[in-house]
Image: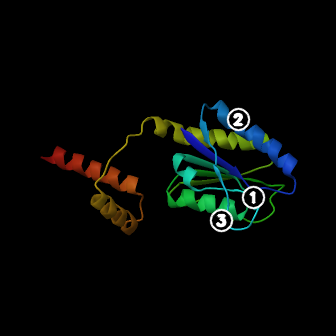
Amino acid sequence: MNVYYSFGYTSKKQKTKSATALLLSHIKRHGINIVKPKQQPRKTGKGAPSTPSLVHLRNAELYIFEASNPTFSLGCEIMFALQNRKPLLILTNKIQTTAPLFVSESATGLVTMKEYVSLTEAKRAIDEFFSKYEEGYHSRITLHIDPLLYKKLGGYAIKHSISKTDSIEQAIVNYKNRRAEH
């Protein structure tokens, strides 16, 4: 399973880096591959620092964001994950939070938000998040759908306020029920 981990930078860089290193090592103990951002130079400004490309985010199945100090790029990454309907965990430190985060847990169940005070609480939140999705990950199948049917499926999902996955599941259940009746 591929997981993307990102955090907002702070003025307390050393403390943030050590906490991030501990959380990353905890994630790796689960035997999970961490997708790392590829640095690409900005198009503007001579000598400007590199910024992560959003292209690499497609390789992740789960996302973990430490958002105690939200930044614009962190917000872009969160929106990318939401747009692609991927499960994400947003961690915020109750003590170090610098600004409110304008994201809430959604009805789809894709967003999980947890506040923590200690790294032990953050690790527990990560463990709970993984346990929620690991079982489903190992029993997943890949379904190749005709592009026209995929477009119709998207319209149906929007009309009924459900995910495309749920609409496929409903279609399979309906098909099984009709076959059982005949």
List the residue tagged with mark 2: 26
Residue plotted at (73% across, 44% down): 122
Going by the numbered disc 3, the residue's amino acid type is Lys
List the residue tagged with mark 1: 49
**Residue 64 x %, y %:** 64, 48
User: Which of the two labelled residues, at mark 1 and mark 2, occupies the earlier sequence position?
Assistant: 2
Q: Judge left or right: residue 143 versus residue 82.
A: left
| Between marks 1 and 2 in the image, the one whose residue lies nearer the viewer | 1
User: Which of the two labelled residues, at mark 3 and mark 2, occupies the earlier sequence position?
Assistant: 2
Going by the numbered disc 2, the residue's amino acid type is His
**Residue 146 x %, y %:** 28, 55
Comparing 112 with 84, the one in front is 84
User: Which of the two labelled residues, at mark 1 and mark 3, occupies the earlier sequence position?
Assistant: 3
**Residue 131 x %, y %:** 57, 38
Circle 3 SS class: loop
Q: Identify whether 31 is placed above or below 53.
A: above
List the residue tagged with mark 3: 43
Residue plotted at (28% across, 61% down): 148
Residue plotted at (35% across, 56% down): 167
Going by the numbered disc 1, the residue's amino acid type is Pro
Q: Judge left or right: residue 95 versus residue 113.
A: right
Q: Is residue 25 visible?
A: yes
**Residue 180 x %, y %:** 18, 44
Residue plotted at (49% across, 56% down): 85
| Between marks 3 and 2 in the image, the one whose residue lies nearer the viewer | 3
User: How many C-alpha atoms fall within 10 Å of the one at disc 1: few (<14), some, or many (≥20)?
Assistant: few
